[in-house]
Amino acid sequence: MTHILVVDGTGRGHAICDLFLRTDPDVTVYYGPGTDALDGHGRIVPVPGIRFDDPDTALAFLAEHPVEFVFVSNIDALSAGYADVLAAAGHQVIGPSAQAARLEASKERGKRFCEDHGLPTARYGAFTDPGAAKAYIRALPYACVVKTDGLTPDGDGAVVCDTAVEATAAVDAFAAAQGERFQVVVEERLYGREISVFALLDGEDYLLFPTALDFKRTLEGDAGKNCDGMGSIAPHPQASPALLEQLRRDLVEPLVAGLRDEGLAYTGFVYIGAMLTAAGLRVIEINTRFGDSEAEAVLPGVHSDFTELCRAVLRKDLGNSLLVTDALVRCSVALTQGCLDPADPGAAPGWPFGAFATGGQVLGLTQFPLDRTRLFYANLRAGAEGQPVTSGGRVLHVVGSGTTLAEARAQAYRRIGAISFPGMRHRADIGAALERSSEPAWSVLEAAPGQAPQPLAPAVAVVPTGR
Ligand code: AMP
Ligand code: GLY
């Protein structure tokens, strides 16, 4: 029996644990801190004592519970130096160093990396002075996005603006919140559909994973604010072989070469958030872990033995590995805890819908007859009697699968109909516009105002996998 440790505590973490269990019958996964709601779920063993901000908590656990390797997939843990500290203590560990994790943890660092290594990205300026940022914005002949430089707990650090007035207001809001630590990037606003691009890296080589389309806005019709993501579909509807080749050539290969040139220690997943614009591909962000809620839609379709892939990463031998995936479409929907009564003494400040109370009982999680859905637990905990209760913004992710997007959506939403908790909110339109459109939505790129839309190569039903 193999034992490994996964360091995470999100729906993505659960999907990674599930990937190990599903593809390797011999593995037991310690999941730290994980969630105690998964206690007794087969071979996942939550380790609540592990803390993202303190790698020593993992070292203490590992001293008593030896594992073959540790898989770190949470940005807070990576930023706290988990990969460095565990490796220095002699553990086999998959995850980028804290220095490499700066590519995600600092917007300016990520942008500079793109420019230095030829990854196409939007024009930008970086500022530590609000007045200078506002002067730059007023002089821009195009719309922009204002981003706070560092990590934000709820993915609400980017304000996409139509006008200079909105953008300068965003600068003022960040300045008020950050005071002395004010640091923003002001970036040209891009128009088009986003695509989430994933690869597993061994430090020298890489393996492409299927793409996804993430729905980041809180409200239906892509209204509301950016958050970590309200749902995803995978594969991305525009993922034609030609596009995948372009993603590999223009984004992933320069990224891997750049990591090598800078001597950054990097193993594990990378997630490039990009935009398909009328002028071509543009990188929006580099993230040093898998996307959440994309992991929930992508990873259930992976059938390669993931423990073996990780061993190949540790041997730096990924170049000889193949990724086997199925040809199903998946639709993942986040069930989030909406604003209850902010005056409630139990209410916590949060996102995506403001203050929420914790501890609401979650009903309807037991096996649903005749369905092809999966549930991934995020801010879901075991209550006093072991019953599942809510503990935060995104509570769980419901994933439907099918041979078409329509089937996948129907599966997911049917399952959601049986689940309830106080203040439950979700977007009812994840993937809906793509399903409804009479002409395949992927056949045309959205264009910037005043420009003609560009046709694209048609997508294929089967995602080509691996290299
Ligand atoms: P980020 O904070 O860089 O992860 O951006 C969060 C989200 O804001 C992205 O996923 C996009 O939806 C949006 N966004 C970021 N940068 C841009 C941009 N330059 N143009 C348009 N939308 C953007
Ligand atoms: N789905 C967006 C993220 O993981 O940052």
Image: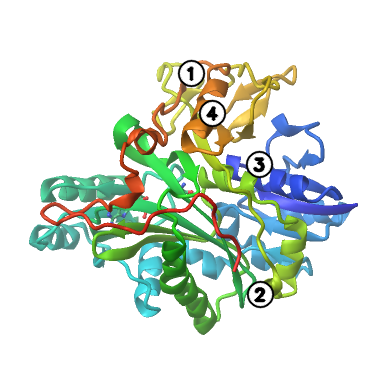
Tell me which label, 2 or 3, sits earlier in the chain: 3
Which residue is the site of mark 2?
319
Residue 164 location in percent, x, y? 12, 51
Q: Residues within 10 Å of mark 2 (few under 14, many from 20)?
A: some
Which residue is the site of mark 1?
345
Answer with the quarter of the image where residue 403 lies. Answer: top right
Q: Nearer the viewer, mark 4 or mark 1?
A: 4
Which residue is the site of mark 3?
14
Q: CA distance from mark 4 to mark 2?
A: 35 Å
Residue furthest bottom as drawn: 261
Identify the residue at horizontal 31%, vertical 36% (top origin): 438
Tell me which label, 4 or 2, sits earlier in the chain: 2
Residue type (three-letter) at the residue carrying disc 1: Pro
Tags 2 and 3 touching, CB below 8 Å: no
Residue 308 location in percent, x, y? 77, 62
Q: CA distance from mark 4 to mark 3?
A: 18 Å
Which residue is the site of mark 4?
412
Tell whether circle 2 marks a residue whose Cβ is less than 8 angstroms from ligand 2.
no
Tags 4 and 2 touching, CB below 8 Å: no
Residue furthest right as drawn: 1
The relative height of residue 418 versus residue 240 in the rendered view (above or below) is above
Q: CA distance from mark 2 to mark 3?
A: 27 Å
The relative height of residue 9 versus residue 397 in the rendered view (above or below) is below
The colour scheme of the drawn protein is rainbow
Q: Nearer the viewer, mark 2 or mark 3?
A: 2
